[in-house]
Each structure stands twice: as structure tokens, then as C-alpha cells.
Amino acid sequence: MSAIVFSLVLIAVIAFGLWYFERYFARKPSRNAGLVMPVAFFIISVVAIIQSAPAVFSEMAETGGIGGAILTLVLSFVIINLPTLFVYVVYYRTRRKMGEERPWPLRPRTDGNAANSKKHKP
């Protein structure tokens, strides 16, 4: 029982630390500073899935279910990306509170090269 309590406390401390540091980085003037953690977590999750794929496929090949192997990898990818989603939501909310209507990855381009910014002659 104490191991479960210790694990829950450890998860809560890690989640609070991620929240604190993501808010700290998201408040920086550079929009890219806040995206470091979500990108890092996403890369880690992709690497983890790529590394586990051979073992999953070889194990599922013995039981005869390639569909089960693919489903296992997809569900694992979704579960592994929960920290990515958590830190990105913190980034998004922090940038919105700072006055950005849509933070950087979701904001349309306004530099004149975007398809919607064609100038019409009167």
C-alpha cells in the first residue's frame, strides 16, 4: 500500500514540476522556448515506439495477430504522448493568458507568403 502512495506522490511531484517549468518557459518572449519540452517528449515517444516495435511484432507473430501488434503500438503511442499533451496544453494556456489569441503553431502565417494573404488590385 505504501508503494502505491509513494508512486502517486512521485507522479504528482513530477507533474507539478513539468507544469512549473513549462509555464516558466512559455512566458519567455521567444515562443520557441516553451515548445522545447513538448517537442522533446514527442521525440522520446517516437523513439520508444520504434525501439519496442520489433519486440511487439515478433511476440504477436507467434500468436498470429498482426492487427493486435499494430493496435498495441498505436495505443502505446497514445499513452506515451500524454505528457506531451499535458505540457503543450500548459504552453497553449500560458501563451493565451499572455495575450496571444492563438499560440505560434496554431496561428496562421502573416508574413505575406501565406496563401490567404494575396493582395487584390482595386
Image: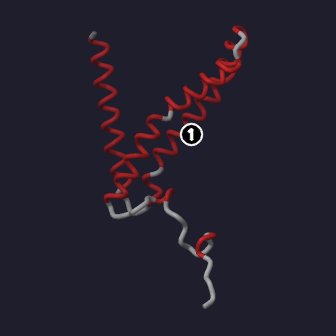
Relative depth, front residue between 105 and 18: 105
Name the side, left or right, on which 22 lies relative to 64. left
Residue at x-position 38% and y-position 54%: 26
Coordinates of residue 92 in the picture (x, y in percent): 40, 52
Quarter of the rendering containing residue 7 = top left
Q: In which quarter of the image is residue 66?
A: top right
Image position, residue 13 (x, y; %): 30, 31
Mark 1: few/some/many CA within 10 Å (<14, 14-19, 20+): few
Query: Taking 80 as reference, is 118 above or below it?
Result: below
Which residue is located at x 51 percent, y 42 percent?
A: 40
Which residue is at a point 69% across and 19% down the rendered structure image?
A: 57
Residue 15 occupies which quadrant of the picture? top left
Q: Height in image: 103 above or below 109?
A: above
- Residue at 65%, 30% (x, y): give it: 50
- Residue marked by disc 1: 43
The kind of residue tagged 1 is: Ile
Which x, y percent locates residue 53?
66, 24
